[in-house]
């Protein structure tokens, strides 16, 4: 059952109470994809971010428990400060750098505190065939002949939503133990490398020579209101140990993504 924002406002306890009331039917799992995700705007809208990403998750977790269901909550690599040099494991110390990350960390704690069966899955650098995404913007800008400059000193794990959906379904299917897990793509790279990889796949799929050169820039050349972690790669290890298959290579996922992009 897919429930949109118009049907269920996670910041409104009365709205969330419709879950244990059975309004959406009998459920085994409640998957929370709702979030306040405007990372830069969150710096000046802390209450709004906390309402959705923090308190709202607590309401959902309590509702899932009352409904006899388990909460599967989606969180983020932005709970980390980026000082690591190896992909983060789920039990690595958190230290969010901004309001968005702090609000998401509050949500993780609320999920685990209010539903003993809750599962928190942190993911990162999402892109998918629907809506705007970084690789789509890069492919389109390159096709339009724009000269591109992309940050090369922020490193993470690009993750295709098509692959994340499969992992989440497998997590549910496996009735995985409660706790925190990391689900991200298998390759660690900078935004600059990710842009080049995406454009190359786009060119190959268009039957053109896969040649691209993008100007690498530093974070200081692309200032943003919210500070981002320099390194936020996530390790899939704990999910793999639970028997969940890892995601496809970045090029395989990008190819699938490009083929599904609306014309
Ligand atoms: N995008 C990334 O790179 C990334 C990376 C790591 C983790 N994540 C996590 O992945 C999850 C999904 O992110 P996303 O990028 O898909 O976000 P998104 O595109 O911004 O979608 C968030 C959704 O939440 C809904 N929503 C907002 N406030 C709500 C409320 N009060 N009640 C119910 N629904 C509400 C929004 O509906 P409206 O549009 O109608 O407001 C929207 O459909 C989030 O938990 C995010 O923290 C994302």
Image (cartoon, rainbow, N blue to C red):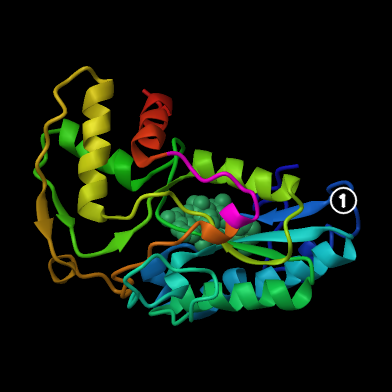
Mark count: 1
Instruction: Choose top left, top right, bottom left or bottom right for residue 156.
Output: bottom left
**Neighbour class for label 1 at 10 Å: few (<14), some, many (≥20)?**
few
- As displayed, is residue 85 above or below residue 124? below
Which residue matches tag 1?
Answer: 23
Q: Which segment is the magenta one?
A: 240-248
Residue farthest toward the front in the current orientation of the protein: 241
Whether residue 48 is visible to the viewer of this picture, yes or no, is no
- As displayed, is residue 257 above or below residue 99? above
- As displayed, is residue 215 above or below residue 48? above
In the image, 199 versus 16, the foreground residue is 199
**Residue depicted at 64% across the width and 61% down the height:** 73
In the image, 207 versus 8, the foreground residue is 207
Q: Secondary structure at mark 1?
A: loop
Q: Quadrant of the N terminus?
A: top right
Magenta span includes 75 = no
**Residue depicted at 27% across the width and 38% down the height:** 198
**Residue depicted at 20% across the width and 52% down the height:** 192
Q: Position of residue 122 (x, y in %)?
A: 53, 62
- As displayed, is residue 184 above or below residue 245? below
**Residue depicted at 88% across the width and 60% down the height:** 67
């Amino acid at each position: 059952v897919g429930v949109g924002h118009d049907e269920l406002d996670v910041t409104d306890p009365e709205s969330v109470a419709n879950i244990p009331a059975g309004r959406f039917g009998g459920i085994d799992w409640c998957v929370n994809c709702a979030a306040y995700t405007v990372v830069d705007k969150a710096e000046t809208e802390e209450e709004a971010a906390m309402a959705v990403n923090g308190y709202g998750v607590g309401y959902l977790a309590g509702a899932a428990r009352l409904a006899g269901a388990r909460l599967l909550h989606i969180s983020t690599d932005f709970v980390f400060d980026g000082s690591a040099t190896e992909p983060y494991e789920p039990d690595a110390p958190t230290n969010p750098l901004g309001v968005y990350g702090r609000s998401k960390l509050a949500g993780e704690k609320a999920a685990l505190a209010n539903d003993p069966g809750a599962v928190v899955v942190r993911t990162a650098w999402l892109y998918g065939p629907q809506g705007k995404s970084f690789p789509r913007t890069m492919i389109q800008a390159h096709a339009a002949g724009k000269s591109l400059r992309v940050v090369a000193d922020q490193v993470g794990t690009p993750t295709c939503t098509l692959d994340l959906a499969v992992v989440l379904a497998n997590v549910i299917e496996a009735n995985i133990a409660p706790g925190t897990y990391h689900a991200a793509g298998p390759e660690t790279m900078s935004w600059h490398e990710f842009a080049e990889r995406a454009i190359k796949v786009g060119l190959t799929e268009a039957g053109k020579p896969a040649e691209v050169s993008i100007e690498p820039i530093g974070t200081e050349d692309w200032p943003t209101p919210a500070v981002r972690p320099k390194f936020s790669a996530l390790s899939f290890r704990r999910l793999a140990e639970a028997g969940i298959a890892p995601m496809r290579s970045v090029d395989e996922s990008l190819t699938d993504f490009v083929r599904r992009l609306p014309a």
